[in-house]
Image (tube, rainbow, N blue to C red):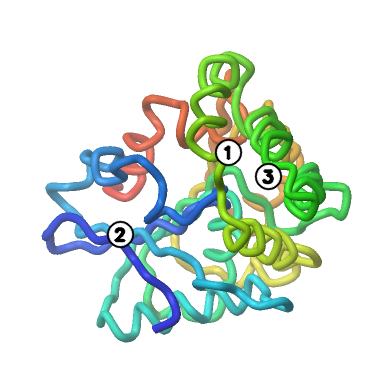
């Protein structure tokens, strides 16, 4: 298996979270993800999948979906409730398109089915290549969080990530490059499981029209928050509850 994962809970149903792009691997981040998903603990065994360790140049999102499928096969998982956020939502789309037999329902949040070359996230790559870590952290925070969250958290984020390693910067560049050219718009009608798309109307990385297009092409429900930014899945206090309620329907 090419990827690591975190597991918590021991309940009959299976949930997999495919995370967005972070400045460091989840295993190195100073937070306990289990506490963020307590609402699922009684009903689901939850897995958070990492992405390929030390990715190589030329990695594509489809490759990352294949890695996740290999992990699912080796773990013997089935009837999976999938949640993909941001980059993880793009991987999730490939995963359900290529391996539909494993999945029962899917949530997509702050993600799209096609990436434009002018996406703001590609500016992070410029800072990463220059090893300008402070500017990278600052731009990342401005692009994914609300102004209020940015102002409260920027100093903490700089103190936590100012010593990010060269290897982590190389990985970040590879993951950003993997997004270039992503386009599954002509395939989404093939998805047969229930899906719900979430996002924020003030997302700075993706437009509301882009996210709505994803829902429309799948032919599924959607819900868009008013007062948050790209990482609405971190900031909105009721986001996990909305996922839980959709899964329970």
Query: Quick check: 37 left or right of 185?
Result: left
Position of 186 relative to 166 (above/below):
below
Along the horizontal axis of the image, is 112 left or right of 48? Answer: right
Residue 118: mark in rendering = none
- Residue at image position (68%, 28%) is 142
Along the viewing direction, whichever of 24 and 192 lies nearer the viewer: 24
Q: Which residue is mark 2?
A: 15
The residue positioned 74% from the left and 42% from the top of the image is 132
Q: Quadrant of residue 2?
A: bottom left
Which of the labelled discs sits on residue 211, or is there none?
3
- Residue 159 picture location, percent across and down: 51, 30
Name the quadrant of the N terminus: bottom left
Q: SS at mark 2?
A: strand
> Upstream in the sequence, badge 3 or badge 2?
2
State the residue position of label 1: 162
Mark earlier in primary sequence (2, 1): 2
Q: Residue at x 64, y 67 (%)?
A: 189
């Amino acid at each position: 298996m090419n990827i690591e994962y975190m597991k918590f809970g021991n309940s009959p149903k299976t949930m997999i979270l495919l995370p967005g792009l972070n400045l460091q691997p989840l295993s190195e981040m100073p937070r306990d993800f289990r506490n963020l998903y307590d609402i699922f603990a009684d009903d689901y065994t939850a897995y958070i999948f990492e992405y390929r360790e030390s990715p190589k140049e030329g990695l594509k999102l489809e490759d990352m979906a294949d890695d996740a499928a290999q992990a699912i096969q080796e773990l013997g998982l089935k009837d999976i409730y999938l949640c993909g956020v941001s980059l993880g939502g793009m991987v999730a789309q490939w995963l359900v398109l290529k391996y539909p037999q494993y999945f029962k329902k899917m949530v997509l949040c702050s993600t799209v089915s096609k990436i434009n070359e002018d996406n703001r996230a590609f500016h992070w790559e410029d800072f990463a290549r220059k090893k300008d870590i402070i500017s990278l952290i600052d731009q990342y925070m401005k692009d994914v969080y609300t102004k209020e969250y940015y102002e409260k958290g920027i100093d903490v984020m700089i103190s936590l990530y100012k010593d990010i390693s060269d290897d982590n910067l190389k990985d970040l560049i590879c993951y950003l490059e993997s997004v270039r050219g992503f386009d599954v718009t002509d395939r989404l009608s093939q998805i047969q499981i229930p899906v719900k798309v979430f996002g924020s109307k003030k997302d700075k990385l993706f437009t509301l029209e882009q996210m709505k297009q994803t829902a429309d092409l799948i032919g599924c429900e959607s819900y868009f928050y008013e007062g948050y930014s790209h990482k609405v899945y971190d900031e909105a206090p009721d986001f996990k509850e909305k996922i839980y309620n959709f899964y329970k329907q």
